[in-house]
Each structure stands twice: as C-alpha cells, then as structure tokens.
Amino acid sequence: MCTAVGLVRAATVADHIQPHKGNPALFYDPANLQTLCKPHHDSAKQRWERLGLVETGANGWPVVAPPGPRR
C-alpha cells in the first residue's frame, strides 16, 4: 500500500488479506498474510474491510469482493 502511493515505510504488521473472522484455517494460512505498515493497517485497510473491499491487488490497492455472501 505504501509503495502504491510512493512511500517507503517499514512493514510492521502481519495482516490477513481475507479477514479470518475466527476461522482458524484463514487465520493460520501463510498465503493469507501480507505485511503492512501500522498506519495503513489501522486506517485504510480497516475501511476497505468495512466496505467489502477485502483483498489487495498486486498494485497495493483494494480488489472489490465478488457479489454474494461476504467471505
């Protein structure tokens, strides 16, 4: 996310790409983790999750969740 807006910050938070919502399979899946800086994790990422934009694309911007039940 930082790189997408031209910033260089240390990634200090392990973030779940797809919110685990208590699902241990998602919680412990290393493929479901990405590193983020704390400011992006605590602000932009949280807003995206509330809006249903739960995944981050290769460019660092959110990917719209497909229609249907939320993951």
Image (cartoon, helix red, strand yellow):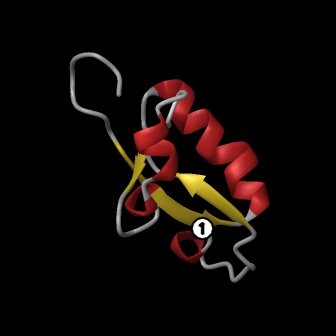
How many numbered discs?
A: 1
Q: Give the left or right position of residue 47, taking residue 52 as reference.
A: right
Q: Quadrant of the N terminus?
A: bottom right
Q: Give the left or right position of residue 21, taking residue 53 as reference.
A: right
Residue 43 vertical placement versus 11 (above, below): above
In percent of width and height, residue 34 lies at: 52, 64
Residue 3 vertical placement versus 58 (above, below): below
Mark 1: give few (<14), some (14-19) or many (20+) Cα within 10 Å: some
Q: Amino acid at mark 1?
A: Thr
Among all residues in the image, which is located at the extreme left? 67
Q: Residue at x 70, y 73 (%)?
A: 11
Dividing the picture into quadrants, the one containing residue 39 is bottom right
Residue 27 vertical placement versus 15 (above, below): above
Q: Secondary structure at mark 1?
A: strand
Decide which of 15, 26 is in the foreground and name it. 26
Q: Residue at x 55, y 26 (%)?
A: 50
Residue holding disc 1:
35
Q: Give the left or right position of residue 56, taking residue 5 as reference.
A: left
Q: Quadrant of the C terminus?
A: top left
Dividing the picture into quadrants, the one containing residue 32 is bottom left
In percent of width and height, residue 2 lies at: 62, 71
In percent of width and height, residue 19 lies at: 50, 37
In percent of width and height, residue 68 lies at: 22, 17
Q: Give the left or right position of residue 24, taking residue 59 as reference.
A: right
Dividing the picture into quadrants, the one containing residue 8 is bottom right
Among all residues in the image, which is located at the extreme bottom? 8
Q: Residue at x 32, y 39 (%)?
A: 64
